[in-house]
Amino acid sequence: MDIEKLKTFYVMAKHQSFTKASEELFCSQPTVTKHIQEIENYVGCKLFDRIGKKVYLNENGKLFLEYAETVLNLTRDYLAKICEMESLGRGVLSFGATGSIGVYRVPYLLKKYLSKYPNIEINLYVNFYHKILEYVHSNVVDFALVADNGEVIESKSLVWLPFCTEELVLIIPPSHRWKDRERVDIEELEEECFIRSNKESATMSFIKKIITERGITIKKTIELGNIEAIKRAVETGLGVSIVPENTVEKEITSGWLIGLKLKNLELKRKLYYVQKKDKILSAAARAFVELLKELYPEFDLS
């Protein structure tokens, strides 16, 4: 049902006069007549009784008026809310992130974002790499922030844009025999107990690729669920690990952990902004993208 025709009916029902209705609607009387006839044809009955030159709303018309008022009010409310969302007075921001990004980078981003747009509702999904990409594909989220997991990016339906380069670091406890060194050979990891994250995590996949390419065989590993657990395990001397450097800044500064580099090997990877190619972002999502551009000069949408 055409909203403009419903509006014509509503005004006509209010005035019960073609002349007054056309004056309020700034249209011709034939246009008003045409709209009323089309509505009556649509519902299959007369809504007005014509007696001489006068027009009266009949019982069918009174019932239809309730419907018209409801639809027009809902439409008015909807358009007002859309306008408010576009102006970021309200809205929902739904996005995903892989583990270390979601835990260690996103809170800072959200603090900046919500200081500008305090009425936006946030839905953040933190999960493993492939699960987050499923969310993007199925429109559960508007976009995602994911870490390079070492795989070749092949998806033709997604846009991948690097927004940051992240460095990883080898962490050891302060009591470790390497404590006075700045760098170690990657081959030396073979004799260490390596504290690893879940095999589905982007960080573990990235590290595994590097180790495999260099023919390294780590004889003993302990798998833990997240980076916080890994840090605590390394602190207590259970082994060593490789984690994103920004996740252990506090521990290294406080002396709870020691961060080392690997000889002749830069542990760097890209962090990506990912969205569907045909995705039309909400105003809330567009504002977050603008924040990323502001905070990460490497992020280029062009």
Image: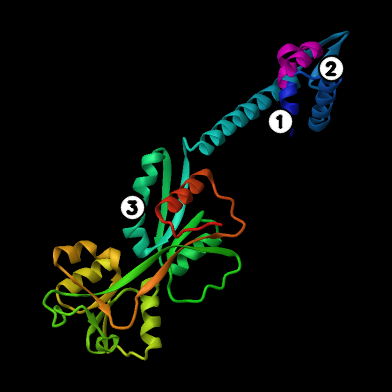
- Residue sitting nearer the eye, 182 or 80: 182
Q: Residue at horizontal 47%, vertical 44%?
A: 92
Task: Report the predominant secondary structure element of the magenta stretch.
Answer: helix
Report the span colored magenta: 10-25
Cα separation between marks 2 and 3: 60 Å
| Residue 34 position (above or below residue 121) | above
The residue singled out by tag 1 in the image is 3
Q: Earlier in the sequence, mark 2 or mark 3?
A: 2
Q: Is residue 235 left or right of residue 225?
A: left
Quarter of the rendering containing residue 22:
top right
User: Is 87 one of the magenta-colored residues?
Assistant: no
Q: Secondary structure at mark 1?
A: helix
Q: Which residue is mark 3?
A: 107
Between disc 2 and disc 1, whose residue precedes?
1
The residue furthest left is 175
Provide residue 154's location: percent of width, then percent of height.
56, 73
Circles 2 and 1 in contact, beta carbons < 8 Å: no
* Res 9 seen here: yes
Q: Along the horizontal axis of the image, is 98 left or right of 87?
A: left
Q: Earlier in the sequence, mark 1 or mark 3?
A: 1
Q: Secondary structure at mark 2?
A: helix
| Residue type, mark 1 in image | Ile
